[in-house]
Amino acid sequence: MGLPGRRRLREILAWAGENPGGPFALAFMALLLMAAVALARGSEDLANRLAEYAYYSLVAAVLLELASTILSRDGGGEEGEG
């Protein structure tokens, strides 16, 4: 039996692979966590830079997910047909 953490990590990576904005959303979370650690250690400049990069990553994730949603609707989705 594998470790529960490894199974969860595989699920997260599979989700990121299926969603166009997934990798950027994961990067956002990692960068924000690193910013919090940097701030706690007293590196305010580094924390600000990391938080800024995290914000850009979040914007990229949202734009990719929005584009994916719009394109999937234009492609003749299953919803609303009938």
Image (cartoon, rainbow, N blue to C red):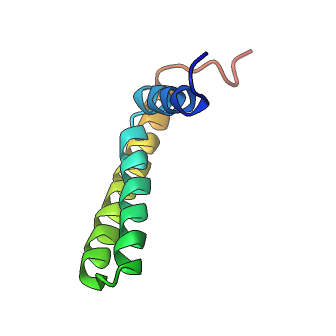
Q: Nearer the viewer, residue 74 or 19?
A: 19
- Which residue sits at x=33%, y=84%? 42
Residue 16 percent location from the top left of the image: 44, 33
- Which residue sits at x=28%, y=81%? 43
Q: Nearer the viewer, residue 10 or 56?
A: 10
Residue 21 percent location from the top left of the image: 40, 41
Work out which quarter of the rendered image holds the C terminus and state it.
top right
Q: How many numbered discs, if any?
A: 0
Work out which quarter of the rendered image holds the N terminus and state it.
top right
- Which residue sits at x=29%, y=68%? 50
Is residue 20 shown left or right of residue 82? left
Is residue 67 shown left or right of residue 5? left
Q: Nearer the viewer, residue 21 or 15?
A: 15
Please tell me in which quadrant of the rendered image residue 49 appears: bottom left
Q: With respect to residue 62, does 39 lie above or below?
A: below
- Which residue sits at x=47%, y=21%? 75
Is residue 39 shown left or right of residue 2? left
Considering every residue shown, the one lying at the far right of the view is: 82
Q: Nearer the viewer, residue 56 or 63?
A: 56
Residue 66 percent location from the top left of the image: 45, 44
